[in-house]
Image (cartoon, helix red, strand yellow):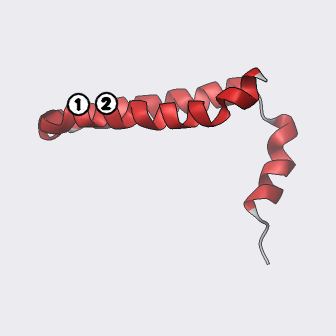
Amino acid sequence: MGRSLTDRWNRVRGEFALQDLALDVAGKVLLGLGLGALLAAALRPCAWWLVVAGVTCSAVVKTKYWKKFWA
């Protein structure tokens, strides 16, 4: 049977660096910008909803870990 995601993460966790995470995030941002540019006219009516949804997603994650981080 295949390995679980936890097993896979534990195997690479020691080699994973902040630079790798930053590069991954930059790639996703560039992908999002590219898709946004391609779909700009179609997405214009719901642009503010997308912004609010993105900020909400980020806020949910930040509040989840806020107390644990500053404890």
Number of the label disc, if any, that sits on residue 51:
2
* Residue 31 at x, y percent in the picture: 41, 35
- The N terminus appears in which quarter of the rendering? bottom right
Q: For residue 3, what is the image quadrant? A: bottom right
Q: Amino acid at mark 1?
A: Trp
Query: Going 82% across and 45% down the picture, which residue do you hit?
Result: 12
Query: Dot 2: what SS?
Result: helix
**What's the mark number on residue 48?**
1
Query: Which quadrant of the structure image shows residue 46?
Result: top left
Expressed as whole percent of the image width and height from the top left, the position of residue 38 reads 22, 36
Q: Nearer the viewer, residue 28 or 48?
A: 48
Which amino acid, by three-letter code, is at mark 2? Answer: Val
> Within 10 angstroms of label 2, few (less than 14), some, or many (20 or more) residues?
few
Q: Secondary structure at mark 1?
A: helix
Position of the C terminus by quadrant: top right
Query: Are dots 1 and 2 in contact, CB under 8 Å?
Result: yes
At x 27%, y 34%, the residue is 36
